[in-house]
Image (spheres, rainbow, N blue to C red):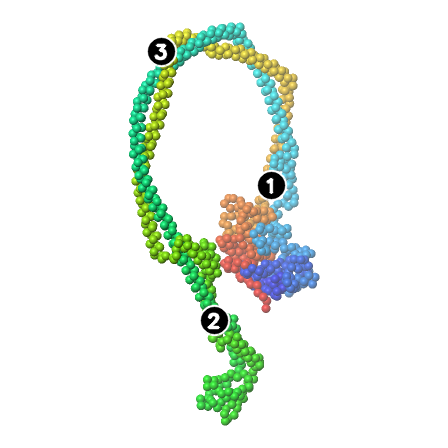
Amino acid sequence: MKIRSIELTNFCKFVGTFRVDNISDNVNVLVGRNELGKSTLLKAINGAIFEKAKSTAAHVKAFRHFVNGTVPEVKLAFDVDGKSWTIHKRFAGQAGKSTLTCSDGRLFEDDAAEAELQRLLGFAGSRSGGEPGIWGTLWVQQGQSFGDAALDEHGQRTMQGCLEAQVGLVTGGARGQKIPKAIKDALETLRSSKGPRGKFKDAMDRLAESKQETADLEAKRQSVFQLMEDLARNKRELKQETDSWDDAAHRREVEAERTKRTVAATHAAELRSATDAAKLAGERATQARRSVDDRAKAVAELESLELQLSDLNAASAGAVAAKADAHASVDTGEAKLSELRSKTSRNAERARNLERIRAIVSLNAEIIQHQLTLDKAASLECEAGKLSELIGAIATTDAAVTRIEEAVTELSAADAAANAVATTVSFALEESALPNVALDGKALDASATSLPILGKTVITIQDVGAITVEPQIKDRAALVARWDAAHEEVKAALETAGVMDLAAARTAAAQRKEYLRRSADVGKELANLAPGNRTKKLAAGLEALKGHLGELRGRLRVEMEKCGLAEIPGEDDLTSDIANNHAEGARFAAEIETAEAELAGPQDALAQADKKLLSARERLAGLNGTIETKKADLAAGRAGASDEQLTASAESLERDAVARDELLAEKLRGQGETVEAIDARIKRLEGAAANHQRSAANLGIEVTRLTALIEANEGAGVEEMLLAAEAERDRLTSAVAEFEKEAAVLKLLSETLEAAEGEAKTRYLTPVISRVEPYLKMLLPGANIVLDEDLRIAAIQRAGQREDFDVLSGGTKEQLAVLTRLAFAELLLGQGRPATVILDDALAFSDDDRIESMFDVLMRAGDKVQIIVLTCRKRLFTRLGAAPLEIREAA
């Protein structure tokens, strides 16, 4: 099928009749802005072919205009098998009409037209309308181009019919499918994707249980063998333990060691006694020698302290004399400093008095300044009153000027309107003749060479007669009334403003504005004269300033009375007095500083003398106390023992200590084995006896236990049970091997059949793939497309990797879907079936390079298939190079 034209009348958004003509055999493009009606055009094509004219379905009723509800009509012209056809449908519910005409003169109406249309285009019909089938795939509506080119059931039957016509039945039909299904069912009874199942799984489970039972019995038999070995070993060890031990010899050895310990303990006690005696004698000798040394040291220290006491007495007498000299110098300096400070105090008092007088002078200056401000305020208030009078004398406000301007404008407009229709009378008179000519009884002005006349006018010429001019003007009364009203308004506005004309009004208004500006400036200046002072808590305003001025005058009077001033001194005299007093104060301060510096030396000398005297007295007191204490200690010691007695006692104790050390050394030389060594040997011998007894007892208990276990296992028949379990295990192993062999055979058979079926399906899909791949190479060089048996895009194969369709980008999905639709159309045309591809706003997700490649693909496919592209992207699709289409309103 080749679509040639489409005509819409009152369809959806279209009001009136619109057409798209001259649709070519190849690639066509309709470019238009959003809401132009491109998608509506595709809806109309679908409606003309697949919807019945008499349908009352809601989606068919939606063909009517959403506002005026007029009856929609669609007329579609197309070519099929070399003949031209036109389907015309008027969607009016039960009153709808379908007409199908052929170029050979045949005419079909209503149901006959619907049936013939279904036959021509190869789609199935139903009570509600046609099923698009393959056309629903080839005609891509807006927003559906990026999905897989899915086929509905009817579309699949159509494509399968085309494919089977080329490759024949490749899967053996229904009977051919029963064998693989039976094999798969048989395999699934034995094995699933998770592993064995059914009888196979039961056999494997029983085999696993049998193997576990056999392993358990084998482990039990090995356990019995191990018990027998352990029993023999424990019996041998018990015999060795009994034979190797001599209990009588061991007891004799222990008794001998205990006797040796008694002797060693006695000798150790004697040794400890000798050691304590030697230690005590040494300590007593050392203490006696220390007492002798301390007595000699105390005598020497006392002699040294008495020499120091003599020196300190001499130093103390010198410090007393130095302190008396320093004290006399300090008294002289302090008397001089006291006199200077009295003078400084009197100078400071005079300075404070001068500062109070200075404050009085400043206060008086502030009073004078405030009085000047009040005087200026009075002058400004007088000026403001005069300006108010001048402003009141001028009645010309801005509003009055605006009124005059509007009135003058209206008068000018009335003059212009009158002049436009008035009769113009021109005069060309000698100047001497002017007095002889009158216009409506008034002498003619010399400047009036031409006059516009609206009403009846009489021109009188002396001694000649009169000329009456009566213009015939439409709406003359209205024009005259307008002019009179405008003239009266100008006159009233000028009188209200009190001026003669507009220029005078503007001058007066400007003068009034100037007075107002000056009055405002005076008001601002008045406001700024008394801004107030937050620091002095003075509020803004002249009244506050007046009150403040009164307070200042009161303060001035009080301060003058305090200072005893009859009049305020001059500022220069006051400044001179303050400067002189300040200089005198500075001189006194310098003299005080000098006197203090001079006094610092004697004061420091006095302090040093005090410090030395105090130190000497403190040292004398301490030294006297130390000497008295040491004399008392020495006298007390000599009262107990004289120096000679103390020395003799020390020598005697030292000789006794030497004798005791020699006795201790002799005993140490005769010492044998220690008590601790003998105790360790006794402990070791007793531990060996306990270990022998414990080991023999444990071995006897273990022999008894092992004997009982062996007798119990021999009675259970472990060997016979193991032989029976091994036989069952071998039988189940053979059964599992048979199941595995059967499953392997079924799997191999299924895989072989699947491979054969895959090869057949490849031949089945080859006609579609062979038509897609030339376009795919233009878009994605080196890539191959993979279709499933339902002709859906499953994946693409590139760079040795399979990429599923679902993981591809939106743009790539859209492009592959368009290529597949082109291949379907070519396959249909190859079988002599009608096919046209319509793309509504497709390729919306393509980048710049891919869109160029897709343009090349569309132009190549257009050599075989009619393609209609509907898009709103004018700038981009101008590069497509397709035949342009337009939606035009029919004449």
- Few, some or many residues within 10 Å of mark 2 (<14, 14–19, 20+): some
Residue in view at x 55 percent, y 79 percent: 484
Work out how far the residue at label 2 is from the one at label 1, CA to CA, in angstroms: 121 Å
Q: Comparing marks 1 and 3, which lies closer to the viewer?
A: 3
Residue picked out by circle 1: 753
Q: Nearer the viewer, residue 747 or 705?
A: 705
Work out how far the residue at label 3 is from the one at label 2, CA to CA, in angstroms: 140 Å
The reply to whether residue 264 is visible in this rendering is no
Q: Comparing marks 2 and 1, which lies closer to the viewer?
A: 2
What secondary structure is found at the residue carrying circle 1?
A: helix
Q: Position of residue 664 (x, y in %)?
A: 40, 9
Residue picked out by circle 2: 390
Q: Earlier in the sequence, mark 1 or mark 3?
A: 3
Q: Amino acid at mark 1?
A: Leu
Image quarter for residue 133?
A: bottom right
Work out how far the residue at label 1 is from the one at label 3, CA to CA, in angstroms: 136 Å
